Image: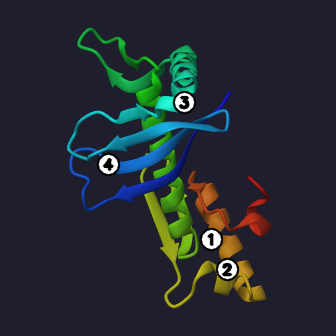
């Protein structure tokens, strides 16, 4: 069973307290509705299409059956803060993954895009050079390979999607 977002439209400009987006929502390859968040801090609304209400109900049940999400935060009593899975949580999670992938694709050609052990992200650039330009030259491949190794030794995770010749397929 699979939930998916397609035709995602994101507006950074309209995003205030939450991300403003709209997307079509699919369950097992069938479109059943539209998801939308206006970016003002409220919920993500999932509107089923009338002809797909049965698929919408199946998707809701499936989302409820997924494991809870244990956050890094704690309640006042010290117990972990847990979010129960539901369709809204799953749609929001898929959108956050979509946003992460968009950032990775954007940054991957600029240089080596990596995540530090503390979770922050950064990019190593070569002024006037993109990764695709560097990978066309033997010295460039060597330069990128050495930089990747240096980052990995420092405990950083390389996020690039365009370094399969150095990192191997993900």
Image: 149 above or below 76: below
Judge the density around disc 1: few (<14), some (14-19), many (≥20) Cα neighbours within 10 Å. Answer: some
Judge the density around disc 3: few (<14), some (14-19), many (≥20) Cα neighbours within 10 Å. Answer: few
Q: Which residue is drawn at 72% across and 81% down?
A: 135
Image: 161 above or below 96: below
Quarter of the image holding residue 152? bottom right
The residue lying toward the viewer, choosing from 118 and 66, is 66
**Residue ID for mark 3:** 52
> Which comes sooner in the sequence, label 1 or label 3?
3
Q: Is mark 2 on a helix, strand or loop?
A: helix
Q: Which residue is drawn at 65% across and 87% down?
A: 133
Query: Label for residue 143?
Result: 2
> Which comes sooner in the sequence, label 4 or label 1?
4
- Left or right of 30? Residue 137 is right
Q: Where residue 6 appears, x then y in whole percent?
A: 55, 49
Q: Where residue 102 appears, x then y in whole percent?
A: 51, 60
Q: Residue at x 56, y 21 (%)?
A: 54
Q: Is mark 1 on a helix, strand or loop?
A: helix
Query: Label for residue 19?
Result: 4
**Residue ID for mark 1:** 147
Q: Is mark 3 on a helix, strand or loop?
A: helix
Image: 18 above or below 121: above
């Amino acid at each position: 069973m699979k939930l998916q977002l397609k035709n995602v439209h994101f507006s950074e400009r309209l995003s205030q307290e939450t991300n403003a987006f709209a997307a079509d929502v699919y369950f097992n390859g069938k479109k059943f509705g539209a998801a939308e968040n206006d970016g003002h801090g409220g919920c993500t609304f999932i509107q089923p299409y009338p002809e797909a209400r049965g698929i919408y109900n199946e998707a809701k049940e499936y989302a409820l059956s997924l494991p809870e999400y244990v956050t890094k935060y704690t309640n006042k009593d010290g117990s972990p803060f847990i979010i129960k899975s539901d369709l809204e949580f799953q749609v929001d999670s898929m959108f956050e993954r979509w946003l992460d992938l968009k950032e990775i694709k954007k940054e991957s050609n600029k240089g080596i895009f990596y995540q530090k052990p503390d979770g922050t992200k950064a990019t190593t650039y070569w002024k006037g050079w993109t990764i695709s330009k560097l990978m066309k030259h033997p010295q460039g491949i060597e330069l990128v390979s050495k930089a990747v190794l240096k980052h990995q030794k420092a405990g950083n995770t390389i996020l690039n999607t365009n370094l399969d010749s150095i990192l191997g397929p993900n």
